Amino acid sequence: MALSNSGLNFIAQAIVNDGTPTFFNNTNAKIGVGDGTAAFAKTQTDLVGTNKLRKSVDANFPTRTNNSITFQATFGTTEANFDWNEWGIFNASSDGVMLSRKVENLGTKNGGTWILTATVAFDTP
C-alpha cells in the first residue's frame, strides 16, 4: 500500500520530533471508507468518493509487529451503507493526515456489521 505525501511528511516530522504531530494511536487513528473509484495519487489528502465515513479504530488497535501496523474498525448496521470502493488510514475525524489510501472494491454494505482490518507495512520496494 503506497503512502500519501502527507503520510510521508508525517513520518519525517515524527522521526525528528518537529512540532507536535498527531499520532496514529488508539485515541486518534481512524479508518475511512468511501465510494470513490479514482486511482490513488500521492497528493490526495482524503478519500475521493461522494459517500465516505471515518470510524475510530477498535479498542487495542492499532497494533505494531516489527515494521507493520494493523488498524481495525467496526462499522455498525447504520454506518457506511454504500459501495466500499476505497479506504484509508487517518489521524483525525476530519482533515488531519491521510497516511495512505487504497482503491479496492470491498462490496456494498447494506446493514449488518462490517469489520475492516488493514495492515500497513513499511518496507522498501
Image (tube, rainbow, N blue to C red):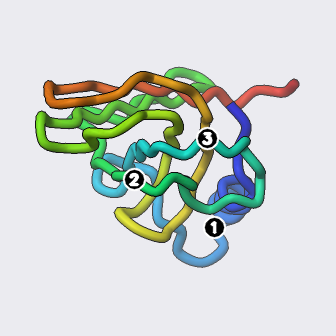
Q: Toward which corner of the image does residue 108 lie, by quadrant?
A: top left
Where residue 17 is drawn, which disc sits there? 1
Q: Nearer the viewer, mark 3 or mark 1?
A: 3
Q: Secondary structure at mark 3?
A: loop
Question: Of marks 3 and 1, which one's residue comes earlier in the chain?
Answer: 1
If the image is split into quadrants, where does the C terminus sit? top right
Residue 77 on image: x %, y % = 12, 34
Question: Of marks 1 and 2, which one's residue comes earlier in the chain?
Answer: 1
Q: Is residue 32 above or below residue 118?
A: below
Question: Of marks 2 and 3, which one's residue comes earlier in the chain?
Answer: 3
Q: CA distance from mark 2 to mark 3?
A: 11 Å
Residue 94 on image: x %, y % = 40, 68
Specify whether 21 is left or right of 106.
right
Question: At 48% across and 70% down in the image, what residue appears?
Answer: 95
Q: Residues within 10 Å of mark 3 (few under 14, many from 20)?
A: some
Amino acid bearing label 3? Thr
Tell me the residue that label 2 is attached to: 51
Question: At 27% across and 43% down in the image, what residue appears?
Answer: 80
Specify whether 67 is left or right of 89.
right
Specify whether 45 is left or right of 119.
right
Tell me the residue that label 3 is attached to: 37
Residue 111 on image: x %, y % = 15, 30
| Residue at the extreme bottom of the image, as rendered | 19
Q: Residues within 10 Å of mark 2 (few under 14, many from 20)?
A: some
